[in-house]
Image (tube, grey):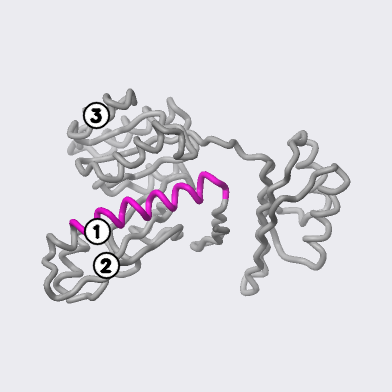
Amino acid sequence: MIIVIQCKDQVGLVAAISSVLAREGLNIVSLREHVDKTDNRFFMRVHVEQEAESDLLYKKLQEVLPPEAGISVNPLPEKKLVVMVTKEYHCLGDILIRNHFKTLGAAVQCVIGNHATLQNICQRFDIPFYEVPGEDDKTAFEGKIIDIVKKYNPDYIVLAKFMRILSPSFLTHFPGTIINIHHSFLPAFAGASPYKQAYERGVKMIGATAHFVTDQLDEGPIIAQQIIPVNHSHTAIDMMKAGKEIETAVLARALRLVFDDRVFVYKNKTVVFE
């Protein structure tokens, strides 16, 4: 059983939480906690050996924690996931393979694409694919996607190289649940064509960033990042090819952390218990 807590910090929180678990006969297997001293914010993830009645344990923890505490007791072990794509296959392919072999930590419900390019690979893995062509009317385009997503009621939406900017109106339907992989080490080279930007700047390393999506383009809370070295001999195309591998790795790592309930979001930052 997993318990995650986020609240205002105060003296004795760890002791109080541990006492509640002990009284319920729950043995702690692992416990990770962090205090953000700047914001006086407490974060904790606890793994206990036994199972308990979630609602009852929630109420007992609520009694010893500050009033506004965010508490989640035994989140679903396998999340529901909708993936959105355009034409690039590398991130989607990795997700589908992990999903097929039950190592993703989530179950892919469907894939939505604004082109039909990746429909075939979804059919091979027996995953429903919906083509929603990009229309001149962005409201209508996003409305069709919203209708599809809500039919599946996913825990998370993953933008696996979905090359369209979603409107603030779209994001209000799915707050805090959309994860994007961006092909640069943010905050450097945000927006379009980051490899071209990096090449023109003459950088000596490139990277990828997985982050939650907000209405500020490529500025949402960062979950995971990674870099690899490059040099003067790399063209923009070379950088792009190398970048695909790191994008796949970073997205896979970020999803594992999120699905395992190891990521806490507060303001525009994350606390990640790896």
How far across and down, in percent of the image, does residue 154 sit?
47, 34
- Residue count near mark 1 (Cα–Cα under 10 Å), binned few <14, some 14–19, many ≥20: many
Q: In the figure, is residue 39 to the left or right of 17? A: left
199 w.r.t. 223: above or below: below
Q: CA distance from mark 1 to mark 3?
A: 26 Å
Q: Which residues are magenta?
A: 241-261
- The residue to which callout 2 is attached is 206
**Distance of mark 1 from mark 2, alpha carbons?**
7 Å
Amino acid type, callout 2: Ile
Three-letter residue code for mark 3:
Glu
Q: Quadrant of residue 187?
A: bottom left
Q: Main secondary structure of the magenta part?
A: helix
Where is the N terminus found, in terms of image quarters? Answer: top right
Q: Quadrant of the C terminus?
A: bottom right
Given residues 63 and 256, the one toward you in this image is 256
Looking at the image, is mark 1 or mark 3 nearer the viewer? 1
Residue 124 percent coordinates (x, y): 27, 25
The residue drawn where x is 33% and y is 66% is: 227
The residue carrying mark 1 is 243
Camera-nearest label, 3 or 2: 2
Q: Residue at x 22, y 75 (%)?
A: 203
**Mark 3 → mark 2, Cα distance in angstroms:** 32 Å
Which residue is at a point 44% across and 27% down the rendered structure image?
Answer: 152
Q: Are marks 1 and 2 in contact (CB under 8 Å)?
A: yes
Q: Which residue matches tag 3?
A: 131
Of the pair 150 and 135, the residue shown nearer to us? 150
